[in-house]
């Protein structure tokens, strides 16, 4: 055990138990050690019988701290979620709810928009109002939004704040409520990676849910994806945080569809995130990638990523839990 002479048992225990709660990168940074050193500490830690290891007064001070952390966690999650945390399960599966929308009639007309990025200087207000005006003109039954409703704040992207004209949670939330209050039809939406910047930056909560709670015609379906049932027709919304924005849009859709179990395939898939427009029919699934209602950002341009602005209106004939026909219109902006 000569290798660990420079690290006391107390220090060893502190480092490894910190790593169990946090991730490796945070541990390396906090204790200013290299990854190989951390791996060695982890191996050496396992060789010790530390079950009855005493660390004196430090242990006594940590117990109340841990107790307070557990109380804080208990306030944020319900009983089912706490059990999932104890099992080490993914909380995302807990919130994966199926939403049922009642619709009587053989024809269903749907509006589809995504990636508005409200609060960014690249959000185009005139495009947004043109979209809802056309949707009202065509008398859609409802509209779906596939995430990045707002542009968020406190991302790790350098200079992000300089691309905002509505800075902060309250400013973006208020502006979004003002815009969507003009919609006369119901809008069902999920949040995207930009909407979740507030959570990751420790600056706020679920901004899309808060926006939806403020207006009767808005309905929050969940974080990143959602399942919807309309008269036996299954629809799915997906945003994602993948780096596929640089790949062809059909590649992204195909990989997602290929991974779907046959028993859980939806009839229609709505994609956000990549700012690309496409309709393809794969594995008997109507797949729509919804472009964006925002202009190409400086970051996208620097990465040579194309931005396709516009929105869809989709006319369906449904019956016997099947889609009899699907006719879509793409409305581009220039």
Image (spheres, rainbow, N blue to C red):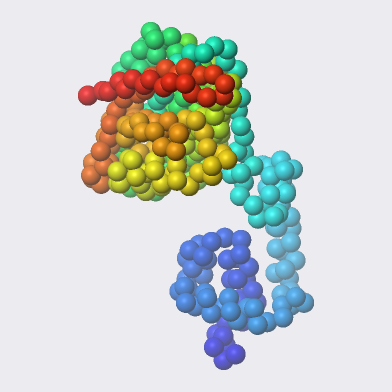
Instruction: State the image coordinates of residue 100 (x, y, percent, origin top left).
Output: 61, 24
In this view, the residue in front, 175 or 102, is 102
As drawn, 136 above or below 264: above
Residue farthest along the right direction in this orientation: 52
Residue 297 falls in image quadrant:
top left
Q: In this rendering, does residue 304 appear at all?
A: yes
Q: Residue at x 52, y 76 (%)?
A: 39
In the shown orientation, is residue 261 left or right of residue 56? left
Instruction: State the image coordinates of residue 291 (x, y, percent, origin top left).
Output: 33, 31
Instruction: State the image coordinates of residue 334 (x, y, percent, origin top left).
Output: 22, 24
Residue 1 falls in image quadrant:
bottom right
Residue farthest along the bottom direction in this orientation: 2
Q: Which residue is drawn at 60% across and 28% down?
A: 99
Instruction: State the image coordinates of residue 252 (x, y, percent, origin top left).
Output: 37, 44
As drawn, 169 above or below 26: above
Q: Residue at x 62, y 34 (%)?
A: 97
In this view, the residue in front, 66 or 312, is 312
In the shown orientation, is residue 228 left or right of residue 250? right
Image label count:
0
């Amino acid at each position: 055990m000569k290798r660990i002479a420079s690290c006391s048992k107390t220090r060893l225990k502190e480092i490894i138990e910190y790593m169990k709660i946090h991730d490796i990168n945070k541990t390396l940074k906090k204790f200013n050690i290299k990854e190989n050193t951390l791996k060695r500490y982890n191996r050496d830690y396992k060789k010790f019988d530390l079950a009855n290891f005493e660390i004196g007064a430090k242990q006594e001070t940590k117990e109340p701290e841990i107790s307070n952390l557990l109380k804080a966690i208990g306030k944020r999650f319900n009983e089912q979620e706490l059990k999932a945390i104890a099992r080490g399960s993914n909380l995302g599966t807990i919130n994966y709810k199926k939403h049922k929308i009642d619709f009587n009639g053989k024809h269903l007309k749907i509006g589809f928009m995504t990636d508005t990025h409200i609060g960014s200087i690249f959000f185009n207000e005139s495009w947004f109002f043109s979209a809802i005006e056309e949707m009202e003109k065509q008398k859609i039954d409802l509209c779906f939004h596939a995430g990045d409703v707002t542009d968020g704040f406190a991302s790790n992207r350098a200079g992000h704040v300089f691309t905002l004209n509505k800075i902060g949670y309250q400013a973006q939330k208020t502006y979004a409520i003002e815009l969507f209050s003009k919609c006369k039809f119901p809008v069902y939406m999920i949040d995207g990676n930009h909407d979740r910047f507030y959570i990751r930056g420790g600056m706020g909560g679920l901004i899309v849910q808060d926006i939806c709670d403020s207006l009767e015609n808005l309905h929050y379906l969940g974080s990143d994806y959602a399942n919807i049932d309309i008269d036996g027709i299954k629809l799915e919304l997906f945003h994602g945080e993948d780096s596929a924005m640089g790949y062809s849009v059909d590649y992204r859709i195909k990989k997602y569809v290929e991974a779907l179990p046959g028993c859980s395939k939806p009839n229609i898939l709505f994609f956000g995130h990549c700012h690309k427009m496409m309709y393809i029919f794969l594995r008997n699934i109507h797949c729509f990638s919804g472009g964006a209602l925002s202009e190409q950002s400086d970051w996208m341009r620097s990465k040579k990523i194309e931005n396709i602005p516009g929105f869809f209106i989709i006319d369906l004939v449904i019956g016997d839990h099947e889609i009899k026909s699907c006719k879509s219109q793409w409305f581009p902006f220039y």
